[in-house]
Amino acid sequence: MKRLLLVLIFSLAFSLGSPPCASAEAFPLKKPPPTLFARTSKVKPVSVVKKIRSSNSSERTRVVIDLSHPVFYQVKRISKVKKLVLQLSQASLGESLSQRPSHTVKGKLVKKIEAKQNGKGQVELSLTYKHLGAHKAMLLKKPNRLVLDLYPPVAAANPFEIQTIVIDPGHGGKDPGATSRKGLKEKDIVLDISRRLKELVEKRLKKKVILTRNSDVFISLKKRTQIANENHADLFISVHVNSAASRRLKGIEVYLLGRASSKRALATARRENAASHKAASNLQKMILNDLEREFTQNASLELAHFTNNAIKKTLISKYPTPALGVKKAPFYVLSHTEMPAILAELSFISNHSEEKRLRSKNYRQQAAEALFKGLAAYIQSSMIGN
Ligand SMILES: [Zn+2]
């Protein structure tokens, strides 16, 4: 239950990074010998926390807390709010820290440290960090001080961490995509939605986003997949709007790679593949043999479901239309990308009422919002799994 949180003087606390999803982890490391807590042991003097200093080297940031005497301390990491909290027992804030309790730390890792007296005999040092990998705390003597070494996150620490997202606005340039009777072009709509999506992901998730195109230019399907692969994207989302011979058809669907689940799904993939010469015909066969993509496929399926749910909640709740669900079809851009990938068909440009919606900025913003929420939900779930 309640773990022993006090760490003995001279003990060394070393944590080798922590899962980014964990909300709070305490790192009690060494149990002090029981004699130290025996009632008979003499009363320890209160340690005065005199000063906070910090320095940077190429590999770490070091924070030194100068003390009058050794202390018991506990380090707790609260990833959710990016804080490292040090609780010092039998300690009191010295005069200069009482007057100026906040210490700014230079460098890339830490923003600041704030000291406060937390009731009698308890001092809390709260360190707000920007990025943090491992941290190490140790008590040193002569002079008495608590040293905290902070290391940057190791890039490869979590191979599942999503860092780069490629958003692929379909068509462009000489390839207008589907065109409505009134001349509205798919290529313009999907570029606008993709830009809105990019902004949401950058702003709210702080992830790197690459658009396969950011203007009205033609880009081959091959080039699109190259952009994603060469940038080692972690997720790929292709944005399209649908079209059908029957003008009554409407709704929104989310695709991942696979054998076409219906004739219409295959027709949709054929239409979207048309910009690439021969690719489409062999694709259906190729996919059957490709078992190595199992992980990517499972992840794509999850991403598709999260996106589909977000579309229902965020978009279809405001703009009623059939939720056509998650489907499989042999899309070229999905088969040649090496990361989890989906393709969204955000309503039918061939349908009168949906065409009208696609013209509205509000609808396009909500569509971007829905795609964003799907991505965000997927990213969150992929973190908890690791
Ligand atoms: Zn398209």
Image (cartoon, rainbow, N blue to C red):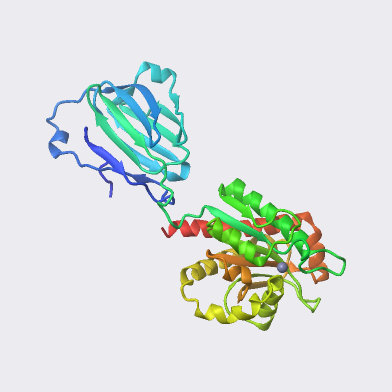
Please determine whether, in this image, residue 26 is positioned above or below residue 42: below
Q: Quadrant of residue 270?
A: bottom right
Give the residue furthest to the top. 95
Residue closer to the observer: 57 or 264: 57
Q: Does 204 sit left or right of 252 as displayed?
A: left
Query: Residue drawn 81% across and 76% down?
Result: 247
Q: Residue at x 44, y 25 (%)?
A: 103
Answer yes or no: is residue 94 visible: yes
Q: Where is residue 107 in the image (x, y as percent from the top left)?
A: 46, 32
* Lateral position of residue 196 relative to residue 154, left or right: right
Q: Which of 352 and 3 is in front in this view?
A: 352
Q: Is residue 62 left or right of residue 144?
A: right
Residue 193, percent across and down?
A: 71, 57
Question: Which image quarter has ligand 1?
Answer: bottom right
Q: Where is residue 293 in the image (x, y as percent from the top left)?
A: 49, 71
Question: Residue at point 53% right, 60% down?
Answer: 378
Q: Horizontal and vertical percent for residue 355?
A: 81, 66
Q: In which quarter of the image is residue 255?
A: bottom right
| Residue positioned 39% across, 27% down in the render | 54
